Image (cartoon, helix red, strand yellow):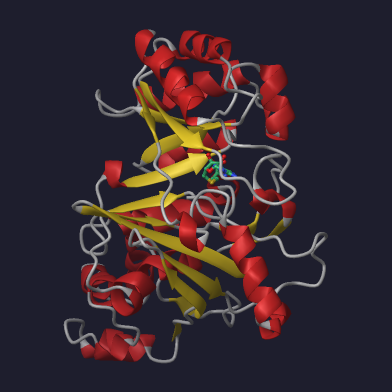
């Protein structure tokens, strides 16, 4: 967000940033806890109203904080209870977030960038090109909005960075947001309740390992470099062996039971042959991981189709026979275009039906109507 210089972005500051600020202003850093509790736990946007901090701190903060929230442009609810919100940020960029309630848990899928620069060929977000990184404030404001304004009755138990964008290309903001998601006085989520999903930015994986304690999901989608580079151009820079080595380093620095999630979207006739499953299993052998098979969600002009159910089942069986834990992700919210790969279509519809949304989309966009996010 475009905050005035010197303004504190209220939802984006981590404990460390508050502590440093308090110390610089001759106040005790212990008040960071009250600030974080007031803002994130109790939903306060005006530090003047946080009674548990001393009046001197409140006066020092007076006029120095800013808490601009995204506009909720559209909201929809699927038959299965999945909720989707289209958010317009202050600079006009539009992102989406999805809340997926399921037995005893509710997963919020956050966006970390408007658009994406990586160009994966099966992903609709890629078609919008890259617009900009979200700030930590903008990332956290998605959860803050759900918790304090949009859906306070549904406690968010899991957060996944699987919305728009490549989180490891915006690591500073994502790590700052992850700090708050994990902070016991803010959202208090466990390491297995926060998942960062990446297309495979190796330096980002190595850095994430050092700056955040969260789960890692890697979008692999192919068992060999030739096919993966075809689907995900980033593979030319960070090929599979190097990527899996980075996954091993990540897992080695974690608790013993920690597993990397390997995401694999099944594309009809492209990466779903039984031989692909066998090669995949061989490559993953020895890596503490579980494979999450994602049924492809087709979109107009996407050029791919979803693998039929029997092919998906056989693929999973082969992985299991080879000793790899594999599950199939159930598409959620597809009737409101909230499942993987469907969100872009919804923005397009919104823009067609509501021309006033159009001004929120930057004019330098190279292709028409194509933001989008995956869940
Ligand atoms: N940039 C991150 C987050 C992307 S979204 C990453 O690449 O991991 C989360 C998942 O949805 C990724 O695994 C992505 O490859 C997948 N995905 C993208 N388009 C899809 C589609 N049309 N159908 C199903 N899954 C898709």
Rendered view: 278 above or below 239: above
Q: Nearer the viewer, residue 24 or 333?
A: 333
Q: Residue at x 47, y 24 (%)?
A: 310
Q: Residue at x 82, y 67 (%)?
A: 364
Rendered view: 89 above or below 187: below
Position of 112 with respect to 153 (left or right) is right
Q: Quadrant of residue 51?
A: bottom left
Q: In this view of the protein, can residue 12 be seen by the observer? A: no
Q: Nearer the viewer, residue 282 or 53?
A: 282
Q: Residue at x 57, y 59 (%)?
A: 343
Question: Which quadrant is home to the N terminus?
Answer: bottom right
**Picture coordinates of residue 251 (x, y %)?**
37, 25
Figure disc tally: 0
**Picture coordinates of residue 107 (x, y %)?**
33, 54
Position of 89 with respect to 215 (left or right) is right
**Picture coordinates of residue 199 (x, y %)?**
58, 37
Quarter of the image where ligand 1 sits: top right
Position of 162 with respect to 157 (left or right) is right
Q: Nearer the viewer, residue 126 or 298?
A: 298
**Picture coordinates of residue 58 (x, y %)?**
29, 88
Q: In this view of the protein, can residue 46 be seen by the observer? A: yes
Q: Residue at x 59, y 65 (%)?
A: 346
């Amino acid at each position: 967000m475009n905050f005035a210089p010197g303004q504190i972005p209220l939802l984006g500051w981590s404990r460390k940033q508050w502590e440093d600020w308090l110390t610089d202003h001759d106040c005790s850093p212990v008040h960071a806890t009250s600030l974080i509790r007031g803002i994130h736990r109790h939903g306060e946007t005006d530090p003047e109203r946080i009674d548990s901090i001393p009046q001197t701190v409140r006066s020092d903060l007076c006029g120095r904080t800013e808490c601009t929230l995204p506009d909720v442009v559209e909201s929809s609810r699927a038959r299965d209870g999945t909720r989707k919100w289209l958010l317009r940020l202050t600079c006009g960029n539009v992102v989406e977030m999805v809340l997926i309630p399921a037995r005893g848990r509710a997963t919020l899928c956050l966006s970390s960038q408007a658009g994406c620069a990586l160009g994966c060929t099966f992903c609709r977000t890629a078609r919008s090109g890259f617009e900009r990184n979200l700030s930590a404030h903008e990332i956290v404001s998605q959860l803050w909005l759900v918790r304090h304004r949009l859906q306070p009755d549904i406690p968010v138990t899991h957060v996944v960075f699987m919305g728009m964008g490549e989180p490891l290309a915006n690591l500073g903001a994502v790590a700052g947001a992850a700090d708050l998601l994990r902070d016991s006085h803010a959202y208090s989520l466990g390491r297995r309740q926060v998942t960062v999903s990446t297309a495979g930015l190796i330096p980002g994986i190595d850095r994430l390992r050092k700056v955040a304690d969260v789960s890692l999901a890697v979008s692999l989608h192919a068992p060999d470099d030739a096919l993966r580079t075809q689907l995900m151009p980033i593979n030319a820079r960070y090929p599979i062996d190097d990527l899996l080595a980075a996954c091993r380093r990540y897992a080695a620095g974690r608790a013993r039971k920690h597993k990397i999630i390997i995401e694999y979207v099944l594309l009809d006739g492209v990466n779903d042959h039984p031989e692909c499953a066998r090669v995949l299993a061989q490559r993953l052998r020895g890596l503490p991981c579980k494979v999450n098979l994602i049924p492809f969600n087709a979109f107009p002009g996407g050029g791919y189709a979803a693998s039929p159910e029997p092919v998906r089942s056989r693929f999973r069986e082969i992985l299991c026979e080879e000793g790899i834990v594999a599950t199939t992700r159930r598409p959620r919210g597809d009737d409101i275009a909230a499942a993987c790969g469907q969100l872009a279509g919804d923005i397009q519809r919104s823009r067609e039906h509501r021309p006033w949304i159009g001004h929120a989309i930057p004019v330098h966009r190279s292709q028409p109507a194509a933001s989008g996010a995956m869940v």
